[in-house]
Amino acid sequence: MKEATKNWLKIAVKDLKLAEASLTIEEPLGVIFHLHAAVEKTLKAIYEENNGNPPYIHDLKKLAVETVQDKLKEKDFKLLNLIDKAFIDSRYPKNIEEFEYEYNIKSCNELIIEVKELIKWLRSLLEKN
């Protein structure tokens, strides 16, 4: 595995830890931001390993299509869309109370579980190479 790929994965692990830390202090903005970053960096690790330098984009669905499209299931696309939407909502909340209602601690906890499963599966694709 390339050193650059390993670096992307190390940073993704840090972002996942930061998402979990944000959950413990009940901060949905941090959970969403770091979950998105963890998935993005994992996808960029796959891109790096297979294609070289990843593009400077943050759109998870687009990045996934460029890296693992043929392997994604419908549930994966739905999760990526949800994370992308939540990320945009977290960066540009019209109303913070509405944001924190929609992305409450319970839903953030469930999202962390789903994202961990997705990242585990994505990482397994790298191990198969």
Image (spheres, rainbow, N blue to C red):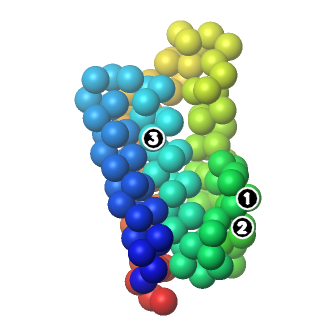
Q: Mark 1 touching mark 2, by CB under 8 A?
A: yes
Query: Would you say 77 lies left or right of 44 here?
Result: right
Residue position for label 2 = 65
Disc on res. 34: 3
Residue position for label 1 = 62
Q: Secondary structure at mark 2?
A: helix
Mark before the other along the chain sequence, 3 or 1 = 3
Query: Would you say 112 lies left or right of 91 here?
Result: left
Distance Cα–Cα, label 3 vs label 2: 21 Å
Q: Secondary structure at mark 1?
A: helix
What amino acid is labelled 3 in the image?
His
Distance Cα–Cα, label 1 vs label 2: 5 Å
Q: Secondary structure at mark 3?
A: helix
Distance Cα–Cα, label 3 vs label 1: 18 Å
Query: Would you say 121 lies left or right of 17 here?
Result: right
Residue lying at 68% horizontally and 54% vertically, measured from the top left? 56
Give the percent coordinates (x, y) of residue 41. Answer: 51, 57
In this rendered view, identify the residue nearer to me: 128 or 75.
128
Neighbourhood count class around disc 2 (C-alpha, 10 Å): few under 14, some 14–19, many 20 upward: some
Give the percent coordinates (x, y) of residue 97. Answer: 53, 10
Residue lying at 34% horizontally and 40% vertically, measured from the top left? 18
Mark before the other along the chain sequence, 3 or 2 = 3
